[in-house]
Amino acid sequence: MRNLFSFIYHYRAFFLFLVLEVICVALMVKNNGYQRAAFLNISDEVVGRSFAVYSEVTGYLRLGEHNKELAMENAQLRSNQATSFYYDSASVHIKKDTTGRQFYSYIPAEVLQTSTNRINNYIIINKGRDQGIAPRMAVISPTGIVGIVKSVSDHFSSLYSLLHSQVTVSARVRRDGSRGTIKWDGESPYLINLEEITRQEQLHTGDTIFTSGVSRIFPDDIPIGTIEHFSLKEPGNFYDIRVRLTADFKKLDYVYVVNNLMSGELDSLINKTENVQ
Amino acid sequence: MFSSLIGYIIRFVLLAFAQVMILNNVHLHGLFNPYIYPLFILLLPFETPPWLVLIIGFLCGLVIDLYSSSLGLHAAATTVVAFLRPYMINLLRPAAGYQPEDKPTISSMGFLWFIVYASVLIFMHHLVFFMIETLSFNQFLFVISKIAVSTLVSMAIIITLQYLFYKRKRTTLS
């Protein structure tokens, strides 16, 4: 026993090293889980606050760009309004509020911190549980999809960026509607892979890619990117497609968190169907 | 002792700030990300006991982790650096041994000593960091080139920092 203690004492630095590394691995494994431990929510709050100060300063530097983006989005929204359509048919069907029930609501938020240089990138935004944000909500920007909410504290949330090795989103080529899955390969923050499109489909460079609406997280028809180049994977039945993202993940500043108001209903329905099978 | 402790804390805050707010946003098409905050561990006094270096290294990595939402990743890499530091110091021991006033800096130990000491430890940090980060990935060549380029860039920044701060301080103080 004495020998054991003296042995441990002699190599105490090495044992301490082992213990610390085990803690690190435990932290990494735990952090990769869907829900983070409670104490991390507190640290999210502290870290979020210090990033809030920083982003207040840097936000001013890009005001011009934001104004342009907002103006463009406003113009687009205005053109979608009922009053900006010209109906030449005699009977006009305009959706009334009583027939159209709201499906998605959007919570605006400011990006406090974002990274693009790692294999698994995360984003911190300045809205949290108090503003109605919950894990698994989709996040989009005026230019395209951004990510999925990972965990929330009272006033901040951290998101899985689209640039994350574990995030996949169902996507659709707008021209012919063929469906695939987008997934990041960890290299360039401007390019993403589109997988599972079979060789029967006809593709062109420049085709636009949108969300397919098959997933319960992202709404339909949110832009993702355009096809940069594609080739056939040999041997195989699928295309190898590189998509240029429309959203610039290095310059993300304002985003919208998408709240699917009927997700509870949908989830319970799907659970029921799966239970029956 | 107390004033030097405050000095070390300020140094850590400055390095962490530079890392999180500036360098974490620097990357050319994902080819390299310089990490300079391990410099803090390298610059701890020679007489710091190994167990304390380990604890400081672990905590220092953990703080960076919190700010880059990668819990455990930086901490694992800095703990390795902290563990290897005493061995590096031993390996590079000058013939006359270390003097009490010696510090692990360019101005105190000379350019060659520092560049060997720092580049080995920084390389180890980057190696562990990028290896763990890409654990489930099979782009081996990409990772290797990323480690090599990042190490070079980090070393360039660290040496610049040494000349910016420590040379001047030394000449005015002594």
Image (cartoon, rainbow, N blue to C red):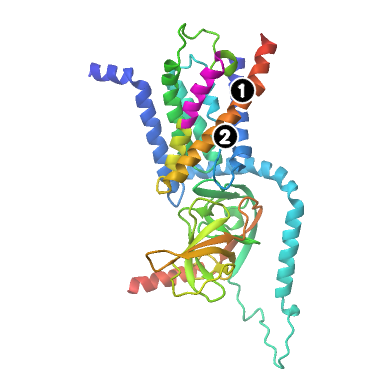
- Measured as percent of width and height from the top left, residue B75 is found at 47, 34
Measuring 52% from the left and 75% from the top, which residue is drawn there? A177
Is disc 1 surrounded by few (<14), some (14 to 19) or many (20+) residues within 10 Å?
some
Residue A96 marker: none
Residue found at the very far left of the displayed protein: A1
**What is the magenta segment's predominant secondary structure?**
helix
Q: Quadrant of residue B23?
A: top right
Task: Identify whether A82 is placed above or below B116.
Answer: below
Residue named by callout 2: B153
Q: What is the chain letter for disc 1?
A: B
Task: Identify whether B78 is placed above or below A13.
Answer: below
Measuring 67% from the left and 87% from the top, which residue is drawn there? A93
Tell which of A187 and B174 is nearer to you.
Answer: A187
Mark 2 residue element = helix
Amino acid identity at mark 2: Val
Residue B36 in view: no
Measuring 45% from the left and 16% from the top, which residue is drawn there? B92
Magenta part of the chain: B109-123
- Measured as percent of width and height from the top left, residue A223 is found at 60, 66
Tell which of A266 and B20 is nearer to you.
Answer: B20
Is B174 situated left or right of B62 in this image? right
Amino acid identity at mark 1: Gln
Residue named by callout 1: B162
**Which callout, 1 or 2, points at the residue further toward the start of the chain?**
2
Residue found at the very far top of the displayed protein: B96
